[in-house]
Image (tube, rainbow, N blue to C red):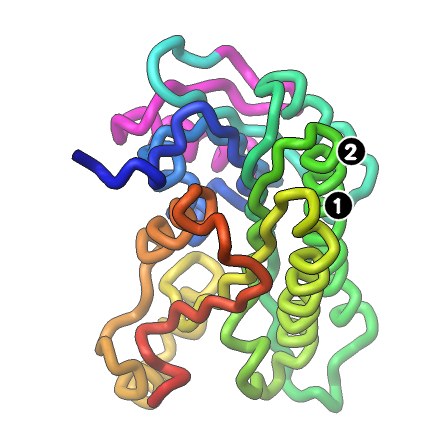
């Protein structure tokens, strides 16, 4: 018999940036564990593909993609896609309202949507580029988590807030200081949320991915010099994959983590320990 606390049947999870990469890996696992899943992303075609992938993988019913969602299959967990730019307060408000209208409740929120950084040098990093990354990675996480926390407090049923940070939050990231700053901010914000909302039965934790093979990292992973220098420093001797984050998503969404809050959970194949 499966370990009962990992059963997410009847729960609703929201995953921003859930149409690809780590977000999709988490959304897939949450649906497979029985949760209904709302996927937010800026690309409607990718949203539709993600919903279809979760449905074809046997993880539940599918729904349409769009601001108001679509009809879902009656059997199994429901999965719906919504077009949303998390950096827009107006869009977050409207799409969150649509999500709640479709699902009726929220138990888990994964603030995963983000963009990469990278500059020739910190000396040449423009304010425009700094703000571009800050707007999505930091302000987008804030807007998403605020909407989720308001709903959870109002409902009085508790819940789990999960912020996706990065190894860059705790290790030096040359020429990527703006990206690292946003991820360090996510870590600090999750700790604050854990303290403020523990009395409401809401847990808040940050997940810090290491070098993970996704669309965001394909540029650097395609660099032979980078591969030769970085991969030998990963004790597991491979790059991380989106599916490597399914387990932590289900754990943090479930009753198995009912006393686990305010933590930063590093998933990097041992890179930071080596």
Query: Considering only order in the chain, which callout, 1 or 2, is on the residue closer to the N terminus?
Result: 2
Check residue 178 in the rendering and tell me which mark sits there, or answer none: none
Is any part of residue 85 visible from this angle?
A: no
Which residue lies at the image location 74% right of the left edge and 90% below the top edge? 123
The spot of residue 125 in percent (x, y) is 74, 81
Specify whether residue 53 is painted magenta.
yes
Which residue lies at the image location 79% right of the left edge and 66% below the top edge? 131
Q: Nearer the viewer, mark 2 or mark 1?
A: 1
Splitting the image into 4 quarters, where does residue 176 fall?
A: bottom right
| Residue farthest left in this picture | 1
Q: Is residue 244 left or right of residue 214?
A: left
**Vertical arrangement, residue 106 with respect to residue 206, above or below:** above
Kindly identify which residue carries mark 1: 146
Splitting the image into 4 quarters, where does residue 232 fall?
A: bottom left
Which residue lies at the image location 35% right of the left edge and 39% below the top edge? 5
* Disc 1 secondary structure class: helix
Check residue 93 in the rendering and tell me which mark sits there, or answer none: 2
Q: Tags 2 and 1 in contact by the CB under 8 Å rule?
A: no
- Bounds of the magenta segment: 43-71
Specify whether residue 47 is painted magenta.
yes
Mark-to-mark CA distance, 2 and 1 = 10 Å
The spot of residue 135 in percent (x, y) is 76, 58
Which residue lies at the image location 34% right of the left edge and 40% below the top edge? 6
Mark 2 neighbour density, 10 Å: few (under 14) some (14–19) many (20 or more): some
**Vertical arrangement, residue 78 with respect to residue 188, above or below:** above
* Disc 2 secondary structure class: helix
């Amino acid at each position: 018999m499966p370990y009962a606390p990992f059963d997410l049947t009847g729960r609703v999870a929201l995953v921003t940036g859930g149409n690809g990469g780590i977000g999709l890996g988490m959304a897939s696992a949450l649906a497979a564990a029985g949760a209904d899943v709302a996927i937010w992303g800026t690309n409607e075609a990718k949203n539709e593909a993600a919903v279809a992938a979760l449905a074809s993988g046997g993880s539940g019913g599918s729904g349409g993609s769009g601001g108001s969602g679509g009809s879902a299959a009656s059997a199994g967990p429901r999965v719906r896609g919504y077009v949303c730019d998390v950096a827009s307060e107006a869009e977050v408000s409207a799409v969150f309202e649509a999500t709640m209208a479709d699902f009726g409740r929220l138990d888990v929120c994964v603030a995963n949507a983000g963009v990469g950084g990278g500059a020739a040098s910190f000396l040449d990093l423009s304010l425009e580029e700094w703000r571009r990354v800050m707007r999505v990675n930091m302000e987008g996480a804030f807007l998403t988590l605020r909407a989720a926390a308001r709903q959870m407090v109002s409902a009085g049923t508790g819940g789990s807030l999960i912020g996706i940070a990065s190894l860059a939050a705790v290790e030096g990231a040359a020429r990527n200081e703006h990206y690292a700053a946003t991820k360090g901010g996510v870590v600090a914000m999750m700790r604050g949320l854990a303290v403020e909302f523990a009395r409401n039965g809401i847990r808040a934790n940050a997940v810090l991915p290491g070098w993970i093979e996704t669309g965001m990292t394909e540029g650097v992973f395609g660099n032979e010099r980078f591969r030769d220098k970085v991969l030998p420093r990963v004790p597991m001797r491979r790059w991380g994959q989106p599916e490597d984050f399914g387990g932590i998503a289900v754990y943090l969404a479930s009753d198995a983590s009912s006393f686990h809050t305010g933590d930063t959970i590093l998933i990097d194949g041992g890179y930071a320990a080596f």
